[in-house]
Image (spheres, grey):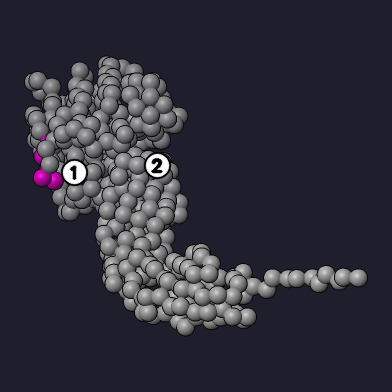
Amino acid sequence: NVTVGAFSTVTYTLSGNAGTGAATVTLSGSAGGTTTADVSGNYSFSGLGNGGYTVTPTKAGFTFAPTSQTVTVSGANVTVPNFTATGTQSTWVISGAITNGAGATVTLSGAASASVTANSTGAYAFPPEPNGSYTVTPSETGFTFAPATQAVTINGANVSNVNFTASASGKAPIAIDVKTFVDQAAASSTVSTSSFSTAAGNELLLAFIATDYLRGTNTTVSSVTGAGLTWALVVRTNKQSGTSEIWRAFAASPLTNVTVKATLSQSVASSLTVVTFTGVDPSGTSGSGAIGATGTGSARTGAPTASLVTTRNNSWVFGAGNDYDNATARTPAAGQSLVHQYLSPAGDTYWVQTQNSPTPASGTTVRINDTAPTGDRYNLSICEILQAP
């Protein structure tokens, strides 16, 4: 009888340290292959038979000593003496992409600082920076980002795929920043506010002016000046005695301790209310881009009313009125309120009135009106304020 013995193949492992993480380690000789060192630089090859092998590490920006090592596997696992890696590159690139983020500003802070703009596809890359800890933050008006920031560490290598997603956020609504007024019982051809300051840039200023009438040609506002701005008439209603007018200006920068003055065509009692608005359309000159439709109303007797049709979503309607017949408190219609009201000793009422909130849809008829009094003479001017597009 012949007995056939069982044979088995024994293999071994070759391991070591490349001197730096993420190095590519190449094996050649009796067998070949490549592997990538872990973050600590450790690597290993398994399933090797007896024989001679050469181990060679490589990594961009590094040199290795020795450049390679030759070892022999002979019936046992082998530990290769450690390599020493020396960096030849001192700075590295952080890059990524922002979905829906073309044109976004991307800021780097931490061990160094930089700011770049994402290209038309949302991709960005910072100039090469040294090793260290950083924070990457994207920003763009009208957008939010997920995540809001990312922490990044450069450790001898470029860092890629620092990615974000941009989402359109709701536009800032129109809001009142400053409201100031002056009521002038004594007849005068000018009326001026006390000093005021605004909190932000890109604010629309509206001057609401209502006056009495004395004699001759009816009263008008000749000009509005102040705050170092250029003022322009928005709407005037003076078919009945006295005038109700709205004037506009635009402040690109915050204002500090400024006043506004209206000059009248004759010396009469008057009231001046100045309101500043944020969240408005900044286009045009002297606030023209922030003004949409206008409307007027006047009658020798009746409940004050004027209407317009909105031209943009989320616009807000304000008005200024004067009652020549009586000093009588206004009763605004539903959904409206008084910004200011002056019951003049001269026997007039001067007031500013508004919707309680903006109108959601363009093309909506908006009416500024009072339910009382119903039998007095009045002028009423109204205008639409436009939200930033």
Q: Residues within 10 Å of mark 2 (few under 14, many from 20)?
A: some
Comparing 283 with 288, the one in front is: 283
Q: Main secondary structure of the magenta part?
A: strand
- State which quadrant residue 11 falls in: bottom right
- Which numbered dot is residue 251? 1
Label tally: 2
Q: Is residue 247 in sight in this rendering?
A: no
Q: Residue furthest right?
A: 1
- Could you tell me which quadrant the N terminus lies in? bottom right
Which residue is depicted at the point 19% across and 24% down?
236
Comparing 84 with 302, the one in front is: 84
Which residue is depicted at the point 27% across and 36% down?
281
Q: Residue furthest front?
A: 1
Q: Is residue 119 in sight in this rendering?
A: yes
The residue stretch that appears in magenta: 224-228
Q: Residues within 10 Å of mark 1 (few under 14, many from 20)?
A: many
Seen in the picture, residue 94 relative to 332 is either above or below; the reply is below
Which residue is depicted at the point 31% across and 54% down?
125
Kind of residue at disc 2: Asn
- State which quadrant residue 317 falls in: top left
Q: Position of residue 351 (x, y in %)?
A: 29, 34
Q: Earlier in the sequence, mark 2 or mark 1?
A: 2
Q: Which residue is mark 2?
A: 100
Q: Position of residue 361 (x, y in %)?
A: 41, 26
- Which numbered dot is residue 191? none
